[in-house]
Image (cartoon, rainbow, N blue to C red):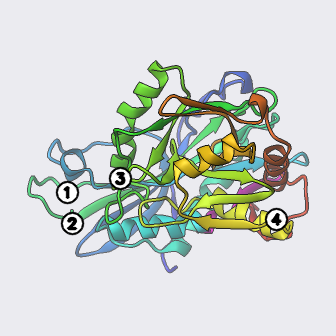
């Protein structure tokens, strides 16, 4: 990294919302990190500037061909007032992997991490301190060149914005109801399902709406070719505990490499639990259920960390998992990860980064 990050202070500071009013993605801090790209100059002009609207040409390529990527991570307030990040280097590495797939020039990872830490240092007071709350971090890139031809843009804008968010769970972890989707497809090998690009999420909305209309919280996606093998649940990775062993779909080119997923796998191996990354057929899950062998099901992701599944509906076969109660295993994993994130437990893995 050889670029100096400029600081442009906001003239007026926003009032900070009450922790009880936070919700998710409703409020934004006073500043944001900005980095510009032009073909002739590369990535340049790193700066922390006041949070404000963007001005874009109506013909900017992002509006027409969807060349945009993003990440999501959090900063956590410890009981003694420190602020911790959880594996931020993994998010930046994954962002660059997404850039590669979307024909966006790679970022200087050291510069991005430095910009992120400086931004959070400036906005430290925005990191809430109530149980379960955090500061959500959204890095993203958009194509800004005004041009209507179908090709990669010659200019981009990279930003990091921050949003204080409330606790995902009001009390104990509540199991969710999941509808197994047979008609719509989230992604297919060779596509962009393994990276975080905006179009993936737009394509999921109709199936999500369908599930909600049927009384379910989320969708379990099957593979795009045979509609047989399990991929993701909503925008999370998924795990199954069967006869004391844990199974999760193997990364196959259409499944996102989740950072919480990776953390769960590392924890389980550290605990001596067998973890199998395999191609998992939904029919095999149903068979395990009918035999009484399906003990727990849970999703993993940044927002919820661990999301227990209480019901799976596959072709009107309703599988009630663990009497629709949160399993001990899911609870143990949730506390193990969040205790590291909030500095309540020793971080033997070196996952956290303190904002100095």
Which residue carries the number 4 mark? 273
Circle nearer the N terminus (2, 1): 1
Eye-nearest disc, 3 or 2: 3
Q: CA distance from mark 1 to mark 4?
A: 50 Å
Q: CA distance from mark 3 to mark 2?
A: 33 Å
- What is the magenta range? 82-89
Q: Quadrant of residue 351?
A: bottom right
Which residue carries the number 3 mark? 224
Query: How many discs mark residues in the rendered view?
Result: 4
Q: CA distance from mark 2 to mark 4?
A: 48 Å
Horizontal side, residue 178 vs residue 75: left or right: left
356 magenta-colored: no
- Residue at the location (46% across, 27% down)? 211
Q: Is residue 253 visible?
A: yes
Eye-nearest disc, 1 or 3: 3
User: How far across and how far down the image is residue 303, in percent?
Assistant: 63, 43
């Amino acid at each position: 990294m050889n670029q100096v990050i400029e600081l442009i202070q906001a003239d007026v500071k926003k009032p900070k919302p009450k922790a009880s009013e936070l919700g998710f993605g409703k409020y934004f801090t006073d500043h944001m990190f900005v980095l510009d790209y032009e073909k002739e100059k590369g990535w340049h002009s790193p700066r922390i500037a006041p949070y404000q609207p963007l001005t874009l040409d109506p013909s900017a390529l992002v509006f027409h061909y969807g060349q945009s990527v993003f990440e999501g991570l959090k900063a956590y307030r410890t009981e003694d007032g420190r602020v911790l990040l959880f594996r931020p280097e993994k998010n930046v590495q994954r962002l660059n992997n997404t850039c590669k797939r979307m024909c966006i020039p790679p970022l200087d990872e050291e510069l991005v991490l430095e910009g992120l830490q400086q931004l959070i240092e400036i906005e430290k007071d925005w990191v809430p301190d109530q149980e379960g709350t955090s500061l959500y971090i959204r890095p993203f890139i958009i194509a800004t060149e005004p041009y209507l031809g179908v090709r990669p843009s010659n200019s981009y804008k990279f930003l990091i914005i921050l949003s204080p968010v409330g606790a995902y769970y009001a009390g104990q972890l509540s199991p969710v109801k999941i509808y197994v989707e047979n008609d719509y497809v989230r992604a297919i090998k060779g596509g962009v399902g393994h990276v975080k690009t905006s179009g993936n999420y737009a394509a999921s909305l109709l199936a999500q709406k369908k599930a909600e209309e049927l009384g379910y919280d989320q969708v379990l996606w099957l593979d795009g070719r045979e509609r047989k093998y399990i991929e993701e649940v909503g925008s999370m990775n998924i795990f199954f505990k069967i006869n004391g062993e844990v199974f999760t779909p193997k990364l196959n080119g259409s499944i996102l490499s989740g950072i919480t997923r990776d953390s769960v796998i590392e924890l389980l191996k550290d605990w001596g639990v067998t973890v199998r990354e395999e191609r998992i057929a939904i029919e095999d899950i149903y068979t395990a259920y009918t035999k009484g062998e399906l003990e727990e099901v849970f999703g993993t992701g940044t927002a919820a960390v661990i999301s227990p599944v209480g019901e799976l509906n596959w072709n009107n076969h309703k599988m009630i998992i663990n009497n629709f109660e949160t399993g001990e295993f899911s609870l143990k994993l949730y506390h193990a990860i969040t205790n590291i994130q909030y500095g309540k437990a020793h971080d033997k893995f070196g996952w956290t980064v303190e904002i100095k």
